[in-house]
């Protein structure tokens, strides 16, 4: 049942604001097509933080240091009334700005450099009464997320500690002084999850705990922090109670939680330490939580555990009393869209947080959350008593992140569209008036010939309606024939939509028509649509993709002899599957993929010990693992294939995806090449090293240029 109500004319306001975002003095300049190396010129906005009085918005500005091949970040600020943004800190690793309750001080995280290497990140304070930023912490393992106390006198933060080996050495010998002279580099693995995409190998002896530090009344003083929580299990998602007497946090105190369905426990502890209390044991995943203004209730976004286990569980909004033993109430059980959901993109900020979560209204009667719906991400207002949903914003865009003033009257948000990476907008929550505050990429984008994609809906083989977009070349002529590239998103529970994606715009600028779709299994279309692929992935989603290709082909402007397919992660799985089930594509690029599900079950950084994707382990359901593994159909493949792999990818390890496909195709003498990126994780396309991201785009287009356009590219030939 859908309770959504839109505000008349709001979409027009959004479009008008975006249309006016380019200064008049640039509008007459001759435009050019976007290039892969424009990535070096992009600027991203992250973590918008509106001041308590609503007069200013602090944010993280992220840019590429091309020479160093890395991302740099610094804090900037912009008036909420409009005007030029100005720089607050020098960077190059400043992030996480947070206002003091009185709005006079900005705390942030800085990772300084020493001899060219980053030091552990620490909390710094920047006073708006003048002076340079001052360090507040100097903890050996660094400070992570933090929060001001309601009275502004204390900051609680996360840091780590390592268990002491007082009783025995790690190698098992007790009291042997000679053994202490050498620290072993041998890893003894006892847990199924022992490494993770990005961080690498995990250290089970290191736990994350809560510390507090007083805020000094004068500069130059570094107070001594105090550790509040201890133990073998990590804490996270920390928040002060509204009266400042207690600190709330979440923790899963199970040594091996992967044997059970998701569970989140919410605790509180006295601000001075001790008197720990368990507030809630939630059967599912709690994503974020926020106290009501009066401190009597807690609202949170999360996913309820289901029996039997589901592959996809749509996130909902819950409300509960703040005391121990309370039972959460699902406010959106009848609202069939994703609470807190976003849209997939290759241009979300590569460094910097994206705040959001739940915002209580001033009178505690309603809640504001982001919702993803049909490829869009907007803010909704939800009645805290009835669950009635109404639109607070509406438009063809993605609200990437947002924060509100204490009274929720003003909301600062970062908005991305199909033709703009992102900018900060200010929303008056009462009137719905939206004002654009930054024009961060205007000078560059005013010179680029970018076009909005065409949104389409089509029917698949069983009558299901599928949403898709067609990105056409800037000089598109419907009387001509164009090569086509089908793009497949990962997840598989994710979604494309109205947000800026460099890859699609660049492919179109190079003369390709790009089709990107949200087949069954995608988010933002309801619980049933998302979960329908459980135990059938890949499967009918492949049919949805082919129906989308047919829909575009019948429009008459596609050269069907020049069609390519690509995708990453789950999209790589489907790319491998597509070419094993049809020969209609002349080239394919499979990125960070899986080809053998059994191998993935054994080696991925997370476990499939609960029956989400498969009903059992590989030896318990071997027929299904084989049937759904793309490598099973390797004998059918005649399509020239490129495989792109990150050598530090623990999410989809290369040896279970591109490597085995590559070797098998070489055996069959099918044109194939593998492109490997050193030190890159599963996040290569989104936050990999800038040059690697550019080279990835170049290789993808080179492959399609070679096999769809007939260009003589020699680098992929055997010498």
Image: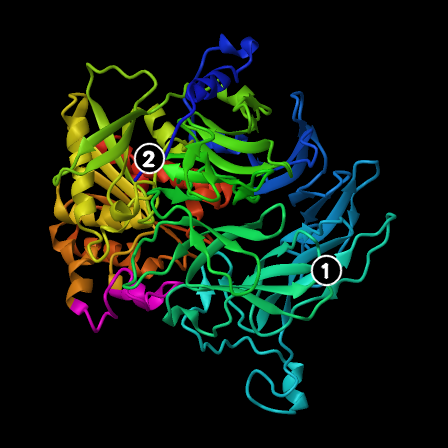
Which residue is drawn at the image coordinates 20% and 17% (left, top)?
Answer: 480
Residue 712, by quadrant, is top left
User: Label 2: which residue?
Assistant: 374
Left or right, residue 460 beside residue 683: left
Q: Is residue 617 magenta?
A: yes
**Quadrant of residue 178 within the rendered picture:** bottom right
Rendered view: 483 above or below 285 = above
Between the residue at mark 1 and the residue at mark 2, the CA separation in whole angstroms equals 43 Å
Rendering coords of residue 229 (x, y %): 65, 68
Looking at the rendered structure, the secondary structure element under dot 2 is loop
Where residue 44 sits: x, y (%)? 55, 34
Asked whether disc 1 touches disc 2, contact meaning CB atoms under 8 Å apart, the reply is no
Query: Upstream in the sequence, badge 1 or badge 2?
Result: 1
Q: Secondary structure at mark 1?
A: strand
Q: Is residue 3 left or right of residue 578?
A: right
Q: Is residue 715 magenta?
A: no
Question: Which quadrant: the N terminus?
Answer: top left
Does residue 329 appear in this view? yes
List x then y, in percent, for residue 550. 15, 31
Q: Is residue 710 visible?
A: no
Query: Looking at the image, what colour scheme do you see?
Result: rainbow
Residue of label 1: 212
Camera-side residue: 65 or 163?
163
**Magenta segment, which residues?**
598-622
């Amino acid at each position: 049942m859908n309770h959504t109500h839109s505000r008349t004319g709001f979409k027009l306001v959004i479009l008008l604001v975006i249309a006016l975002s380019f200064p008049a003095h640039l509008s007459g300049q001759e435009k050019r097509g976007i290039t892969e190396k424009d990535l070096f010129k992009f600027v991203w906005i992250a973590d918008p933080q509106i001041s308590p009085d609503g007069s200013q918005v602090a944010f993280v500005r992220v840019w590429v240091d091309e020479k160093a091949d890395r991302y740099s970040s610094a804090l900037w600020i912009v008036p909420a009334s409009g005007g030029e943004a100005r720089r607050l800190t020098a960077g190059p690793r400043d992030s996480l700005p947070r206002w003091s309750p009185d709005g006079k001080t900005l705390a942030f995280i800085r990772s300084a450099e020493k001899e060219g290497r980053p030091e552990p990140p620490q909390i710094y304070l920047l006073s708006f009464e003048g002076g340079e930023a001052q360090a507040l912490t100097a903890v050996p393992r660094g400070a992570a997320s933090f929060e001001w106390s309601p009275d502004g006198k204390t900051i609680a933060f996360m840091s780590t500690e390592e268990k002491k080996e007082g009783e025995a050495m790690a190698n098992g010998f007790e009291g042997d002084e000679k053994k202490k002279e050498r620290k072993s580099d041998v890893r003894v693995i006892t847990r199924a999850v022992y490494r993770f995409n990005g961080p690498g190998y995990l250290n089970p002896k290191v736990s994350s705990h809560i510390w507090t530090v007083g805020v000094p009344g004068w500069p130059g003083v570094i107070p001594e922090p105090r550790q509040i929580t201890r133990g073998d299990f990590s804490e996270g998602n920390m928040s002060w109670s509204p009266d400042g007497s207690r600190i709330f946090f979440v923790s899963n105190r199970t040594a091996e939680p992967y044997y059970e369905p998701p569970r989140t426990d919410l605790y509180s502890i006295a601000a001075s330490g001790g008197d720990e209390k368990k507030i809630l044991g939630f059967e599912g995943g709690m994503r974020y939580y926020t106290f009501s203004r009066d401190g009597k209730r807690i609202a949170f976004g999360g996913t309820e555990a289901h029996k039997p286990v589901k592959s996809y569980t749509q996130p909902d909004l819950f409300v509960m009393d703040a005391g121990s033993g309370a039972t959460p109430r699902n406010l959106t059980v009848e609202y069939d869209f994703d609470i807190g959901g976003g849209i997939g993109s290759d241009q979300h900020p590569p460094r910097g947080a994206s705040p959001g979560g739940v915002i209580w209204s001033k009178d505690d009667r309603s809640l504001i959350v982001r919702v993803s719906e049909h490829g869009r991400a907007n803010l909704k207002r939800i009645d805290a008593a009835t669950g009635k949903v109404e639109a607070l914003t509406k438009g063809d865009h993605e609200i990437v992140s947002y924060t509100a003033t204490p009274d929720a009257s003003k909301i600062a948000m970062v908005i991305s569209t199909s033709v703009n990476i992102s900018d900060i907008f200010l929303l008056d929550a009462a009137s719905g008036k939206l004002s654009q505050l930054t024009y961060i990429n205007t000078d560059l984008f005013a010179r680029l010939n970018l076009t909005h994609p065409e949104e389409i809906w089509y029917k698949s083989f069983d009558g299901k309606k599928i949403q898709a977009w067609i990105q056409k070349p800037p000089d598109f002529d419907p009387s001509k024939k164009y090569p086509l590239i089908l793009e497949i998103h990962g997840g598989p529970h994710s979604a494309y939509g109205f947000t800026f994606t460099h890859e699609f715009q660049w492919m179109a600028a190079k003369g390709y028509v790009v089709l990107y779709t949200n087949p069954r299994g995608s988010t933002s279309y309801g619980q049933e649509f998302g979960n329908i692929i459980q135990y059938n992935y890949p499967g009918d989603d492949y049919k949805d993709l082919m129906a989308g290709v047919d829909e575009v082909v019948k429009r008459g402007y596609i050269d069907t002899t020049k069609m390519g397919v690509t995708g990453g992660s789950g999209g790589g799985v489907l790319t491998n599957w597509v070419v094993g089930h049809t020969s209609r594509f002349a080239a394919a690029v499979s990125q960070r993929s899986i080809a053998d599900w059994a191998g993935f079950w054994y080696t991925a950084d997370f476990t499939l010990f609960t029956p989400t994707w498969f009903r059992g382990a590989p030896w318990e359901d071997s027929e299904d693992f084989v049937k759904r593994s793309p490598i099973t159909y390797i004998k059918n493949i005649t399509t020239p294939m490129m495989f792109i792999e990150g050598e530090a990818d623990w999410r989809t390890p290369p040896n279970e995806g591109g490597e085995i496909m590559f070797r098998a195709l070489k055996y069959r003498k099918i044109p194939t090449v593998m492109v490997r990126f050193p030190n890159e994780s599963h996040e290569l396309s989104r936050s990999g090293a800038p040059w690697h991201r550019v080279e990835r785009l170049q290789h993808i287009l080179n492959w399609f240029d070679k096999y769809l356009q007939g260009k003589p590219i020699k680098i992929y030939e055997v010498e």
